[in-house]
């Protein structure tokens, strides 16, 4: 595949959906298949750590609303990448619930995949996307997946599982209904993941393959 030329513009795919709707599975499948030929950016990297610092308990901080993200920096980085520049993206620590001092370099690629729960809520970000994908799954399925993920990957223990469920009921679900679910009307493609995300990953993979052909 030829490198990205100055006259070319990266093709940006936006993938969104509620918590545990299958975004991570799709993203990991794309990274495994294309092996460095595409760039994946997670909106989670751009969480504002200050929101948690201001609370006496991290779970009282509402991280499921558009203002929880530094979308201004994310937009700037996307413009820089489109212009062929390498950017230094932030790194967010889920267990500490704050930004770290580390930065990760992101190099421009012909295809950039941006994923996150609130990427459709910002018109500035939406305007940069060439193809917008919404992953949807039933609420009970997403809750089960989220709890398993939080236990296996994000430090939630059996002892504090109750507070995790209460946080979902009091904050995550209402914010989903308010901010995420209505965004599906912006999607060019909606993919159901109730039975798993393998089929959705295949649909996105074929689209990426089609876009990459022009760079060969």
Image: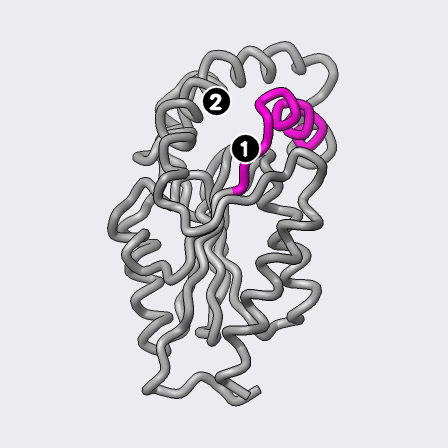
Q: Nearer the viewer, residue 205 or 76?
A: 205
Q: Quadrant of residue 32?
A: bottom right
User: Which residue in the structure is indicated by mark 1?
Assistant: 19
Residue 122 lies, in percent from the top left, at 29, 44
User: Which residue in the structure is indicated by mark 2?
Assistant: 172
Secondary structure mostly seen in the magenta stretch: helix
Task: Please tell me the numbered disc located at residue 199.
Answer: none
Q: Quadrant of residue 99?
A: top left
* Quadrant (top left, top right, bottom left, bottom right) of the C terminus: bottom right
- The image's colouring method is one colour
Q: Who's the residue at 37% across and 37% down the image?
A: 183
144 in magenta: yes
* Label 1: which secondary element: loop
Residue 30 lies left or right of residue 18; in this view the side is: right
Residue 162 lies, in percent from the top left, at 64, 10
Label 1 environment density (alpha carbons within 10 Å; few <14, some 14–19, many ≥20): many
79 in magenta: no
Residue 26 visible, this angle: yes
User: Pointers 2 and 1 in contact (CB under 8 A)?
Assistant: yes
Label 2 environment density (alpha carbons within 10 Å; few <14, some 14–19, many ≥20): many
Q: How many marks?
A: 2
Q: Who's the residue at 59% across and 39% down the image?
A: 192
Specify start and end residues of the magenta stretch as a single range: 135-150
Against 84, residue 29 (above or below) is above
Q: Nearer the viewer, residue 120 or 92?
A: 120
Q: Earlier in the sequence, mark 2 or mark 1?
A: 1
Against 72, residue 51 (above or below) is above
Residue 170 lies left or right of residue 119; in this view the side is: right
> Alpha carbon of mark 2 to alpha carbon of mark 1: how far?
8 Å
Q: Quadrant of residue 196?
A: top right
């Amino acid at each position: 595949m030829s490198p990205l030329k100055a006259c070319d513009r990266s093709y940006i795919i936006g993938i969104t959906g509620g918590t545990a709707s299958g975004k991570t599975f799709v993203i990991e499948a794309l990274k495994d298949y294309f092996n460095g030929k595409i760039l994946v950016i997670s909106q989670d990297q751009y969480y504002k750590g200050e929101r948690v610092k201001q609370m006496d308990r991290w779970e009282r901080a509402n991280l499921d609303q558009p203002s929880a993200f530094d979308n201004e920096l994310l937009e700037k980085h996307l413009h820089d990448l489109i212009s062929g520049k390498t950017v230094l993206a932030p790194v967010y620590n889920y267990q500490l619930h704050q930004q770290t001092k580390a930065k990760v370099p992101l190099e421009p690629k012909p295809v950039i995949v941006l994923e996150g729960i609130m990427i459709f809520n910002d018109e500035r970000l939406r305007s940069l996307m060439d193809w917008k994908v919404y992953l949807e799954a039933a609420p009970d399925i997403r809750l089960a997946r989220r709890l398993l993920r939080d236990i296996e990957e994000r430090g939630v223990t059996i002892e504090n599982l109750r507070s995790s469920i209460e946080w979902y009921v009091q904050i995550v679900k209402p914010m989903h209904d308010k901010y995420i679910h209505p965004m599906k009307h912006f999607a060019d493609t909606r993919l159901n993941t109730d039975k798993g995300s393998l089929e959705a990953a295949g649909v996105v993979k074929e689209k990426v393959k089609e876009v990459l052909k022009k760079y060969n």
